[in-house]
Image (tube, grey):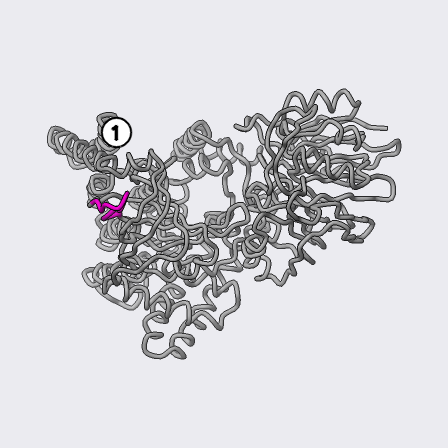
């Protein structure tokens, strides 16, 4: 416990000390008082974190005990889709435990995880502050240090109380909003609740990714940036209709309170509201200088109240965006007013300041920089205020008259349609984002570039230098685009997309069309690959199995592309797979079918035969996931039932064949080699080249070209050195995505040609 307390004290005090030092310099006060405050806040933060580790619950969790738990929900239960299953996750405060027939009083934060598909509806109907009783196994948290234990629950909870009045009102308002948006189109129906209260339950994942690409994602979550932009729009409206400088802040305060109630007054909403109030009070009164110490005080208070904010990226982005609006926006607005109307100067300065302030952290987290974010936010800004205000009114009106709520939502939906159009258009641009080094180094590099650019822009000569550099970059980009080798190579048959530790393949079927097999772990990676291949039509989408490194990128496939049909692999619980795919695929009208051995598909010039999974029944080695005799394999790993149930495809072009194997392991490989003709010219190495390979299977395939989809420096040790030796011994040409980037196999004049986008390649005759 001493270690926990000391660590917490260092983290919280360090963050708070930095903030108070800035405040002290700004207002000219002695540093001694803030230092004393920081020391006290550090001690209190340490005690707060130590309380998480106190009591009997952490010890029982370490022993993996089974217990009944009386708890109070502290957040909305959320449905998560992972590994093809629907799981409910909820935060709660445990108040009593029953272990071994004895009840123990506790007061510890816990995370509830519910893996029973039949109980999803019962859990999602619950509201924060609801008292419940659950039974399940306890486990220590793997990452979150602000919870005492994880409780793995089964079945619905037992209700032992009712939610608070405030939460019931908030729940009724949110339900009214969802009912009001029912008649809207699917995109508007998902965006409006997200914009108003951060409710993304109706939001299409593909559209959500487009908002993220264009820098508009802050509109879809309850964040300080979102609150600030909404209140800024309310402030502009107040001034436009002639309200005085004293009335406008009051209107902003009312907007904050209404937003907090509707979005649920939990800690995250309160943090966002505090950031928004700081900005509104400063900007509405024209006293930006006083807003800076107010921001520092807010940071100190919030970190003292919730020490874990000190390591929250969401909180960091909220503070940076608010600081940008207080420090940068007024200066940029005043300078722009010399050359344009005041309203336009303010409209440009606000999104630009927020984006520049957050850019280094966003680049660190995402590994890319958006080139359209400022323009997208500028274009979206006029629609934010009307859609949000009308959404709030619709939520309230629906309590009295649902038709009135729906009418207001219809008008708000017109503004939301503009937001959707901006997101669609911005995300469809070829260079909407550019790759950037991720991590701290990338953030530091971008920060240096921003500071250097700002320094140069202060002087006339510097402005000429910046203009010349930008012109040079544009010219170099044009030249490189003309001279660089084209991608994809002519006559390409198959491309293994570099999506990190995951699988995503594209099979050419015609002009701007391809069959896609798996979608990788992230939407932006598969979307980037398909955009580079100029694929706009996907006649068939195959998801070999439900693991997240194969299906979580699905929204990226759907972004701006038509999909004819989806073929889905089985899992131990295949109904969960269909359930996890029903929302994104069903929202765009894509039919979903289960894959079965023997199915054949004719797509363009491709003949596709499904070789696996075989019929699942007890004792089938391809689906049981056991390995009694590892034989001459590379490791004695028991196979995974989910991996062995992967869809296996045999693909035939006029002059080449390929075997696409998903993540099948030793048992399924042996069964497949014995039951089917697996010979192929091209092999997608099973399971990222893991050690669970059958040498006899690899010999039976006899591929001339092998491609391994694998992430750089992954923690699994993929690909196995033994597997690579086996493949090289067979004389196959082998490329891998972690080293070669996107890998293309093309039909050349003398046979197959394999090309890595990073310059590697060769031919295979």
Q: Residues within 10 Å of mark 1 (few under 14, many from 20)?
A: some
Q: Camera-side residue: 433 or 239?
A: 433
Residue 661 is at least partly visible in this image:
yes
Tell me the chief SS of the magenta region.
strand
Residue 414 appears left or right of 249 = right
In the rendered image, which residue does mark 1 sit on?
4
Q: Position of residue 84 (x, y in %)?
A: 55, 49
Q: Camera-side residue: 498 or 326?
A: 498
Q: Is residue 128 magenta?
A: no
Residue 45 appears left or right of 611 = left
Tell me the residue at 32%/71% (across/down). Answer: 396
Q: Which quadrant is the N terminus positioned in?
A: top left
Q: Position of residue 49 (x, y in %)?
A: 24, 35
The residues colored magenta run 94-104
Q: Residue 342: which quarter of the image? A: bottom left
Q: Residue 622: which quarter of the image? A: top right
Q: Camera-side residue: 228 or 308?
A: 308
Relative to 99, say whether 585 is above or below: below
């Amino acid at each position: 416990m001493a270690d926990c307390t000391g660590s917490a004290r260092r983290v919280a005090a360090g963050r708070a000390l930095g903030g108070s030092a800035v405040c002290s310099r700004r207002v000219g006060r002695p540093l001694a008082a803030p230092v004393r405050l920081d020391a006290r806040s550090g001690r209190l933060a340490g005690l707060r974190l130590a309380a998480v580790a106190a009591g009997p619950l952490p010890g029982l969790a370490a022993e993996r005990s089974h217990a009944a738990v009386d708890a109070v929900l502290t957040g909305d239960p959320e449905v998560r889709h992972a590994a093809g299953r629907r799981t409910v996750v909820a935060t709660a405060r445990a108040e009593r435990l029953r272990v071994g027939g004895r009840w123990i009083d506790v007061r510890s934060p816990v995370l509830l995880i519910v893996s029973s598909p039949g109980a999803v509806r019962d859990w999602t109907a619950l509201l924060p502050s609801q008292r419940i009783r659950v039974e399940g196994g306890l486990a220590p948290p793997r990452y979150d240090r602000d919870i005492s234990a994880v409780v793995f629950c089964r079945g619905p909870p037992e209700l032992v109380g009712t939610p608070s009045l405030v939460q019931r009102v908030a729940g009724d308002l949110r339900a009214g909003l969802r009912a009001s948006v029912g008649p809207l189109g699917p995109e508007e129906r998902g965006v409006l609740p997200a914009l108003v209260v951060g409710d993304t339950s109706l939001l299409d994942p593909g559209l959500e990714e487009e908002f993220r690409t264009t820098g508009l994602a802050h509109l879809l979550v309850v964040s300080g940036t979102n609150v600030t932009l909404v209140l800024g729009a309310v402030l502009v409206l107040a001034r436009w209709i002639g309200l005085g400088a004293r009335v406008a802040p009051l209107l902003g305060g009312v907007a904050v309170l209404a937003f907090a109630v509707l979005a649920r007054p939990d800690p995250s909403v309160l943090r966002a509201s505090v950031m928004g109030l700081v900005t509104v009070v400063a900007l509405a009164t024209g006293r930006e200088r006083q807003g800076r110490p107010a921001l520092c005080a807010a940071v100190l208070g919030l970190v003292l109240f919730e020490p874990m904010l000190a390591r929250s990226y969401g909180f960091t982005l909220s503070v940076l965006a608010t600081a940008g609006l207080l420090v940068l926006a007024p200066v940029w607005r005043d300078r722009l007013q010399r050359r344009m109307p005041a309203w336009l100067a303010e409209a440009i300065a606000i999104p630009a300041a927020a984006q520049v302030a957050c850019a280094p952290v966003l680049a660190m987290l995402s590994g890319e920089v958006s080139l359209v974010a400022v323009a997208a936010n500028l274009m979206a800004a006029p629609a934010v205020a009307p859609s949000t205000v009308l959404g709030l009114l619709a939520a309230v009106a629906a309590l009295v008259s649902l038709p009135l709520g729906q009418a207001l939502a219809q008008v708000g939906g017109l503004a939301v349609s503009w937001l959707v159009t901006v997101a669609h258009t911005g995300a469809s641009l070829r260079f909407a984002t550019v790759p950037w080094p991720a991590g701290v180094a990338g953030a530091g590099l971008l920060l240096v570039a921003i500071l250097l650019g700002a320094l140069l822009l202060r002087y006339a000569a510097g402005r000429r230098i910046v203009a010349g550099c930008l012109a040079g970059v544009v010219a170099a980009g044009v030249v490189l685009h003309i001279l660089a080798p084209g991608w994809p190579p002519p006559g390409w048959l198959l491309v293994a997309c570099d999506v990190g530790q995951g699988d995503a393949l594209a099979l050419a079927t015609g002009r701007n069309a391809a069959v896609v097999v798996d979608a990788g772990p992230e939407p932006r990676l598969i979307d980037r690959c398909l955009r580079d291949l100029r694929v706009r039509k996907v006649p068939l989408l195959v998801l070999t199995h439900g693991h997240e490194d194969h299906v979580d990128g699905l929204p990226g496939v759907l972004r701006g592309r038509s999909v004819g049909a989806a073929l889905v692999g089985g899992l131990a619980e295949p109904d969960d797979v269909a359930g996890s795919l029903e929302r994104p695929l069903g929202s765009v009208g894509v039919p979903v079918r289960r894959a079965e051995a023997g199915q054949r598909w004719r797509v363009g010039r491709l003949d596709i035969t499904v070789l696996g999974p075989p019929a699942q029944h007890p004792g089938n080695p391809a689906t049981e996931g056991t390995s009694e005799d590892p034989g001459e394999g590379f490791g004695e790993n028991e196979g995974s039932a989910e991996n062995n149930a992967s869809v296996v495809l045999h693909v035939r072009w006029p002059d080449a064949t390929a075997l696409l194997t998903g993540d099948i392991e030793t048992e399924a490989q042996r069964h497949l080699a014995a039951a089917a003709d697996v010979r192929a010219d091209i092999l997608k190495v099973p399971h990222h080249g893991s050690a669970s390979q059958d040498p006899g299977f690899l010999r039976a395939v006899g591929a001339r070209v092998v491609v391994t989809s694998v992430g750089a420096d992954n923690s699994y040790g993929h690909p196995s050195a033994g597997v690579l030796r086996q493949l090289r011994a067979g004389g196959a040409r082998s490329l891998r995505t972690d080293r070669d980037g996107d890998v293309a196999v093309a039909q050349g004049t003398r046979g197959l040609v394999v090309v890595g986008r990073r310059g590697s390649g060769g031919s295979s005759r």
